[in-house]
Amino acid sequence: MIKISRKAQRGFTLIELMIVVAIIGILAAVAIPQFLDYMKSSKRSEAMLNLNSIEKGAGARFAEDSAFPNLTAGFTPGTACCNQAGKKCAVVQTDWVGPAGTPTAWDELNFEMVKPFLFQYDYTPNGGGAGFVARARGDLDCDTTTVDYTLTATTTGGNPAYAIQKPARGD
C-alpha cells in the first residue's frame, strides 16, 4: 500500500494576525486625520471660488460705472448652513435676486448661488463706491466655530485693487 503524505496545513499564527491588525491601526491613525483635513480643504475652496466670482462681478461693474456697487447685502442666506437640512444652505433664488425693478447688491454683482453651498456671503460698500468688503463665513463641521474669508477692494488712482484674506486657521 502506498502511503500518501499530507502536506502540513499551515495558517496564520495569532502573533502574525496581531501584527497585521497593529499595522492597520497605525495606518488608520495617520490616514483618518489627513482625510478629514483634505475634506475641510475641499470645502474651503468654495469660499475662494465664490469670492473670486464676486470680485469679477464687481470688476465688471467698476469698468462700466467707475465705481463698485453701492448697495449693502447682509449675510445671505440669513440662516447658517448648519441649521438647514443636510448641513448645507439650500438654493433660494429670492435670496439672491431682488424683485423686478429693485436691484440688490447681488444683482449688481451678477452673483447668485445655484447649487447647495456651505458658506454665507455678505457685501459692504465703502467710500461711495470706491471700495468694498465681501465676506464668506462658514462652519464647515458644524461645531459653532466659523471661518471667515474676506475680499477687500480699494481704488488707487482710478484702478481697482483686490486682496483676499484667508483665515489664520481652518475650521
Image (tube, grey):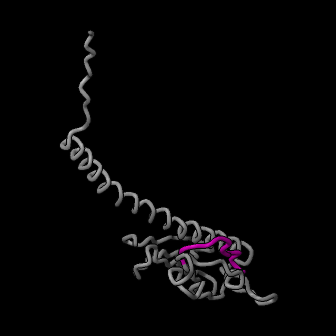
Q: Residue at x 65, y 74 (%)?
A: 113
Is 56 drawn above or below residue 80 in the view shown? above
Residue nearer the viewer, 94 or 53: 94
Q: Is residue 71 left or right of residue 162?
A: right
Q: Per the image, is 109 magenta?
A: yes
Furthest residue in direction right, as rendered: 100
Q: What residue span does the magenta drawing correspond to?
A: 107-119
Q: Residue at x 43, y 59 (%)?
A: 38
- Residue 71 pos. (x, y %): 66, 88
| Quadrant of res 146 | bottom left
Quadrant of the rendering where the C terminus is positioned: bottom left
Q: Residue at x 64, y 84 (%)?
A: 129
| Quadrant of res 117 | bottom right
Total tally of numbered discs in the picture: 0
Q: Is residue 58 left or right of residue 83?
A: right
Q: Residue at x 27, y 10 (%)?
A: 2
Q: Is residue 41 left or right of residue 106?
A: left
Furthest residue in direction left, as rendered: 15
Residue nearer the viewer, 90 or 124: 90
Furthest residue in direction top, as rendered: 1
Q: Main secondary structure of the magenta part?
A: loop
Is 30 drawn above or below residue 154 in the view shown? above
Q: Per the image, is 88 magenta?
A: no
- Residue 73 pos. (x, y %): 62, 87
